[in-house]
Image (spheres, helix red, strand yellow):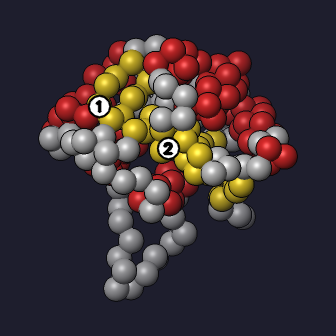
Amino acid sequence: MTTPDHASGWANPPRPTELAHRLLEGVLKPGDHAIDATCGNGHDTLFLARQVGAAGRVLAFDVQAAAIGSARHLVEEYGVGSQVSFVLESHARLAEHTAPGACAAVMFNLGYLPGADREVITRSEETLPALAAATVALRPGGWLCVVCYPGHRGGDDEAAEVERWMEGLTPSGWRVARYGMLGTRKPAPFLLVAVKPG
Ligand code: SAH
């Protein structure tokens, strides 16, 4: 992960995954609880674990044992493994593992695991119930961050459905935003954020 050089500013607009980290830095405090709903290789898990510190808790879901293996390796390498619990289950079962209103942030990074089986992709049948469970797990003022990947098979539909679903939170008082690059050759990944009414 690159970090902004405050002396010279950003050379380019940040990638959605990077922007999610920069936004959540202003939200997460030591001792907080957070969830990585798609741990993959563990970059978001590591970020969350460092933000919440030894007094905090991070729950990280993935359906692939190989993903959890490499994520576990990463957080241990950085000495923050003790605050992370890995769950080798679908994030659709998130509610079974979390107390309502306890969480400061929930992150989703959709699509497939880079370098692994491209058939194992997140699917809206599971993503949408998991997002609904995440809204319950979050505390008032908690943040839901979702990086969507149009531009791969299955990804376009999922990205569109997730965007529609997130927009549907606004009548109940959630503040929802979408960030992504314009003018790219292929549809660019984008970040959706939703802040729970406080
Ligand atoms: N597209 C991102 C990486 C996404 S990784 C990038 O390019 O960097 C997405 C992860 O979600 C994968 O590791 C995959 O195994 C996991 N996943 C897929 N379906 C899931 C589910 N139902 N519950 C939890 N994790 C899931």
In this view, the residue in front, 193 or 154, is 193
Q: Element under label 2?
A: strand
In the depicted view, which residue is nearer to us: 158 or 139? 139
Residue type of the residue flagged with mark 1: Val
Whichever of callouts 2 and 1 sits on the residue coming sooner in the sequence is 1
Whether tag 2 and tag 1 are in contact, CB under 8 A, the answer is: no
Placement of 15 over or under 126, stated as above or below: below
Residue 157 percent location from the top left of the image: 77, 32
* Residue nearest the observer in this picture, 54 or 193: 54
> Is 41 on the left or on the right of 179, as rendered?
left
160 relative to 30 in the view: left or right: right
Tag shown at residue 96: none
Within 10 Å of disc 1 (Cα), the crowding (few <14, some 14-19, many 20+) is: many
Vertical relation: 46 (above or below) 64: below
Q: Position of residue 9 (x, y in %)?
A: 43, 81
Quadrant in which residue 169 is drawn: top right
Q: Residue 105 shows which numbered tag?
A: 2
Residue 84 shows which numbered tag? 1
Query: What is the distance, in whole Å, between disc 2 and disc 1 at their CAs?
Result: 14 Å
Residue 195 showing in the rendered view? no
The N terminus, quarter of image: bottom left
Residue 56, image x, y percentages: 30, 40
Q: Residue at x 51, y 64 (%)?
A: 14
Tell which residue pokes out farthest to the bottom in this image. Answer: 7
Q: Residue at x 35, y 76 (%)?
A: 5
Q: Residue shown at 67%/50% (left/top)? A: 197
The amino acid pointed to by label 2 is: Ala
Q: Is residue 100 above or below residue 140?
A: above
Any part of residue 60 in sight:
yes
Disc 1 secondary structure class: strand
* For residue 11, side relative to residue 7 (left or right): right
Q: At 46% across and 76% down in the image, what residue appears?
A: 11
